[in-house]
Amino acid sequence: MFLPLFTLEGINAFSKDSMVDHIGIEFTEIGEDYLKATMPVDERTIQPLKLLHGGASVALAETLGSVAATMTVNPEEKYCVGLEINANHIKSAKSGKVEGIARPLHLGKKTQVWEIKISNSDE
């Protein structure tokens, strides 16, 4: 599914000097049908109540979805960015890292739909 020209090293290097880098998102695993990344819960990503900011979670999800989608197309011909995002915040996180995993639900010719789940070390 993912084109072989994409590597963790390449994706992480491409993210340098961007918001992805600024908030500490790191791509950690490319699977057969998924992409994983982590993000710290620290002063860059918390809200005033010292909980993970919902916007930071959405930034992680948007990053995973856009990068995963781009990894399915020839980057010399196309690129992918977010079209719509819907987020539900079920639990909070106060410290450590959260991990996101993106999996495709639909890979069409012009649009894609990805499911991104974010969890802490306790799942």
Image (tube, helix red, strand yellow):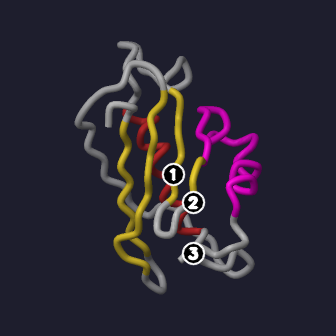
Q: Tell me the residue that label 3 is attached to.
A: 72
Q: Is residue 10 magenta?
A: yes
Asked if labels 2 and 1 touch by Cβ distance under 8 angstroms, the answer is yes
Q: Residue at x 69, y 81 (%)?
A: 77
Across and down, in percent, residue 114 comes to: 39, 64
Instruction: Name the residue type under label 1.
Output: Lys
Classify residue 123 as left or right of residue 9. Answer: left
Determine whether 57 is above or below 32 in the image: above
Three-letter residue code for mark 2: Ile
Count neighbours of disc 1 (C-alpha within 10 A) and say few if under 14, some if 14 to 19, many if 20 or more: many
Which callout, 3 or 1, points at the residue further toward the start of the chain? 1
The x, y position of residue 10, in whole percent, is 75, 56
Residue labelled with disc 2: 30
Q: Give 118 or 16, whichever is nearer the viewer.
A: 118
Which residue is rendered at x = 23% and y = 36% of the image? 90
Q: Which residues are magenta?
A: 7-27
N-terminal label among 2 and 3: 2
Which mark sits nearer the N-terminus, 1 or 2? 2
Residue 58: image location, x then y, percent: 42, 43
Residue drawn at x 37%, y 55% as measured from the top left: 85
Disc number at residue 48? none
Above or below 21: residue 65 = below
How far is disc 1 from disc 2 in space, using C-alphas? 7 Å
- Taking the image as shown, residue 88 lies to the left or right of residue 39, namely left
> What residue did someone put label 1 on?
36
